[in-house]
Image (tube, rainbow, N blue to C red):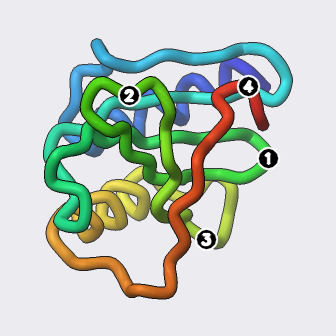
Amino acid sequence: MKTLALDYALRVTRELGLSGESSCVDRDKPLRVYIAVDGRLPDHPDCLVALLWTERHGWAMAVEEPGGAELTVVAHLGGAVEPPPRTVARWVRKLLTEQRPAHEVNRPLDRRAG
């Protein structure tokens, strides 16, 4: 399972045109992936952007305030836990170019939580 999940995360990284240099994998259960994303979200122009994946919940987009260590999840990609990499890339690009609906909730992410 871990090898398949890591291969999947690598395919998503490539689909986004990223090198994967600013990525990490937490192999503990549940398996988690962090991928730094180039660009800024319109609603959070001063924040770094990261794509997060867990084998339980699938993909989420998070931001990190300048100088902060806490990630805040700002969007989840619903549906399958492992959607096609092209679907993930389209979702990320859309988030990077569009304003989010006001009803989406920002919440801090405990990096230890699964």
Point out which mark residue 2 bears. Answer: none
Residue on which disc 3 sits: 78
Q: Which residue is mark 2?
A: 68
Give the residue type that dot 1 points to. Answer: Arg
Q: CA distance from mark 1 to mark 4?
A: 14 Å
Number of residues whose C-alpha sits closer than 10 Å to that of mark 2, classed few (under 14), some (14–19) or many (20 or more): few
Query: Would you name the residue on which mark 4 appears?
Result: 112
Q: Are marks 2 and 3 in contact (CB under 8 Å)?
A: no
What amino acid does circle 2 point to?
A: Gly
Q: Quadrant of residue 15?
A: top left
For the C terminus, the image quarter is top right
Residue 106 location (% of width, % of height):
51, 63
Badge 1 density bin: few <14, some 14–19, many ≥20, Cα 10 Å? few
CA–CA distance in space, label 4 to label 2:
16 Å
103 horizontally vs 21: left or right: right
Label 3: element kind: loop
Q: Position of residue 39 (x, y in %)?
A: 14, 45
Tell me which label, 1 or 4, sits earlier in the chain: 1
The residue pinned by badge 1 equals 56
Does 102 sit left or right of 3 as displayed?
left
Of badges 4 and 3, the one in the foreground is 4
